[in-house]
Amino acid sequence: MSLPQVRPPVSTTGLVYMWNGTTDGQDDGYINTVDGSTNVKSSKEVTMEVENVRNLVKPPKVESHGYQLVNFTTSLPSECFLDAYAPENKKLVEELYFDECRRLVQDITGAVEAFPYVYRIRNQSADVTRLADIDFHKDSAPIVHVDRDPETAPDRLRYSLGSERANALMSKYKRFASINVWRPIGTKVQKWPLLLVNHQSVVNWDYGTHMGRVHFINDQRRVGTRGVKSHETVLKFDPGYVYHYASEMAPDEAWLFYAFHSEPEYAIPHSAFWDKSTSADAPTRWSIEVRIWVFFEDR
């Protein structure tokens, strides 16, 4: 006798943080990493309903929405990603896994050129009861953001590919983006799933109108690891947002989403979020993300 199929939840209740302005009324915030001074207010706590894309009649697609859940199997074992910065594993990730991600992205997006440029391993284990203890300026925390904007993306592109090559690509292609291939490692996601923010119903959504900027002062460590980045870009709340996630996301699945796009309607604010239905004994969430520069022919 077969067991009945358990349908995935239609939605869940989630918690994240967003931009909450500055203490001195300035448009932009700052954080001085030497003396700790800042004009950034404590982040805005936002509780919302998060729709499960597994139940949508028409799930979001990269070409229309800027993000998509896809099937994706890698040839590398989980152990390689769990120790991904060991020299032998780093080589495998940057050669074999980067190429797997590049081919996936070009197949799904139709990008004519694609260049993987960095990977990150995330290990999020804190419980929501501990969020008050997180230093949002340096710890991994559920703050909704985009990775780059029209000011910081060209700088990162030049840092990634070299100024001559980057400038030539931006001259050749007017449409370009940084796309993220985000995938769990080892087991299904039971804690801190990824949140994607759909802002298509928000009229004239743009980086300048709906993102707050935080400038980091005297932070040479950040420059050394990320290249020049004048500011971080944090989402401002809008009641028109729709929030999406994928329940029980497995290691043979991946989110593709534009963490920056030269056309703002495709730029996807994102973050881990606290799912209020999370089990008390849910295991740590491990994930890997690969960021890829992609370039498109003009429409």
Image (cartoon, rainbow, N blue to C red):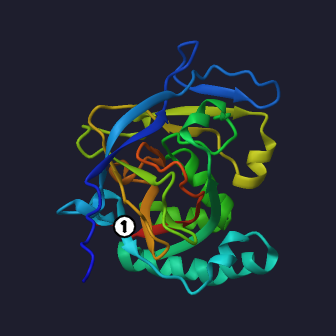
Q: Mark 1 points at which residue?
A: 69
Q: Which image quadrant is residue 120 in? A: bottom right
> Nearest the camera: 56 or 144?
56
What's the amino acid at mark 1? Leu
For residue 25, side relative to residue 156 (left or right): left
> Nearest the camera: 28 or 123?
123
For residue 132, side relative to residue 180 (left or right): right
**Which quadrant does the N terminus fall into?**
bottom left
The residue at 51%/67% (across/down) is: 183
Q: Which image quadrant is residue 37 in? A: top right
Residue found farthest to the front: 1
What is the x, y in percent for residue 149?
50, 46
| Residue 163 appears in view | no
Mark 1 lies on a secondary structure that is strand
What is the x, y in percent for residue 145?
50, 43
Give the vertical position of 206 relative to 173 (above or below). Answer: above
The residue at 35%/65% (across/down) is: 68
Residue found farthest to the bottom: 75
For residue 144, side relative to residue 24 (left or right): left
Q: Which image quadrant is residue 49 in? A: top left
What is the x, y in percent for residue 185?
57, 69
Residue found farthest to the top: 24
| Residue 95 appears in view | yes
What is the x, y in percent for residue 179?
48, 63
Give the vertical position of 167 relative to 2 (above or below). Answer: above
The residue at 49%/30% (across/down) is: 19
- Report how many numbered discs are placed on residues in the image: 1
Q: How crowded is mark 1: few (under 14 residues within 10 Å), some or many (20 or more)?
A: many
**Which quadrant does the C terminus fall into?**
bottom left
Give the vertical position of 119 relative to 75 (above or below). Answer: above
